[in-house]
Amino acid sequence: MIYFNCNGKLFTEGSLVVGADSRALRYGDGLFETMKMKDGLLILEDEHFARLWKGMVVLQFDIPIHFTPGKLQKEISVLIKKNNHENNTRIRLHVFRGDGGLYDAKNNIPNYIIQSWALPEGAGEWNSNGLVAGIYEEAKKACDILSNLKHNNYLAYVLGAIKAKKEKWNDAVMLNTFGRICDTTIANIFLINGEVISTPALKEGGVAGIMRKKIIQELIHLSWNIVEKEITTNELLNADEVFFTNSIYNIRWVQRIDDKVYANRITQKIYAAIIPTI
């Protein structure tokens, strides 16, 4: 039996905990964090909770004094023990507003749901076969105060994922409203040209990824030439190497995007230098 936590109480998987008046259901009014637990420890937990709290401020939640990262950490620990998911686990923490219409929310206090899933063997290890991806162009991300958040209005990514599945891609590269590279449906994106590593600046509309931030910090520490900037699709398709990053799979080498095939010499060096230390 698998359980989840809703507002501090455990329910069995499949239990109904929100109704038709939920603003999360009606408007996508909320945020989420996807975290990894390895050997009983949350990876980069302070960064995840800092991003969540920043997002709650942007979405104008009224955060009670007792609603703290420490409280959520304890409830995550209880849940993963109940589910026997302590070794290598994906955790989704969903924070959302309660019931109400667009102009008449009952209150702005955060509700929350915590779920956990056991990760497959080898999740986060070097992917020697490489990913296959494509560029999704139909729905584009705006560059605004919401674009760096992991918020519940995920339709552009949903459509990108549907396209990826239809085309048999592992992931889809997303564009912003200017037609430049933003991120992917589940990851941030890095390009390598010669000895220069680049990634879309956050003002380009991508999610402010926790692993993205960590990789940039480590690359700077290791004296790599890392640049955050505007990146066009032409630059992407002419790069020497490409890799994707997220909190669950760390760094994943991209073998092909459309008809472009990429090398992995430097990506593999970066993986070996950084990931074992996280």
Image (cartoon, rainbow, N blue to C red):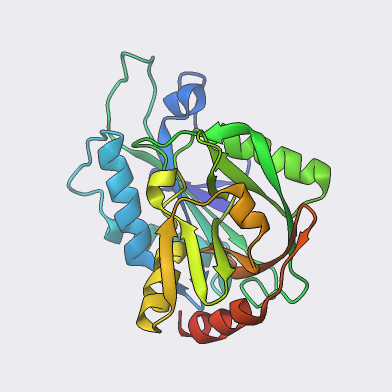
Q: x and y percent of residue 157 in the render?
A: 60, 40
* Horizontal relation, residue 21 to residue 165: left or right: left
Name the residue rendered at 50%, 35% in the picture: 178
Q: Quadrant of residue 244?
A: bottom right
Q: Quadrant of the C terminus?
A: bottom left
Q: Quadrant of residue 255?
A: bottom right
Name the residue rendered at 61%, 31% in the picture: 139
| Residue 15 shows in the view | no
Whether 123 is drawn above or below 141: the answer is below
Whether 195 is drawn above or below 177: the answer is below
> As rendered, which of 229 and 41 lies closer to the eye?
229
Q: x and y percent of residue 113 in the render?
A: 46, 45
Whether 122 is drawn above or below 227: the answer is below
Q: x and y percent of residue 60 in the render?
A: 25, 33
> As rendered, which of 242 and 76 lies closer to the eye?
242
Q: x and y percent of residue 241 in the render?
A: 64, 69
Q: Residue furthest left?
A: 65
Name the residue rendered at 30%, 41% in the picture: 56
* Horizontal relation, residue 9 to residue 266: left or right: left
| Residue 102 shows in the view | yes
Q: Quadrant of the N terminus?
A: bottom right
* Horizontal relation, residue 66 to residue 149: left or right: left
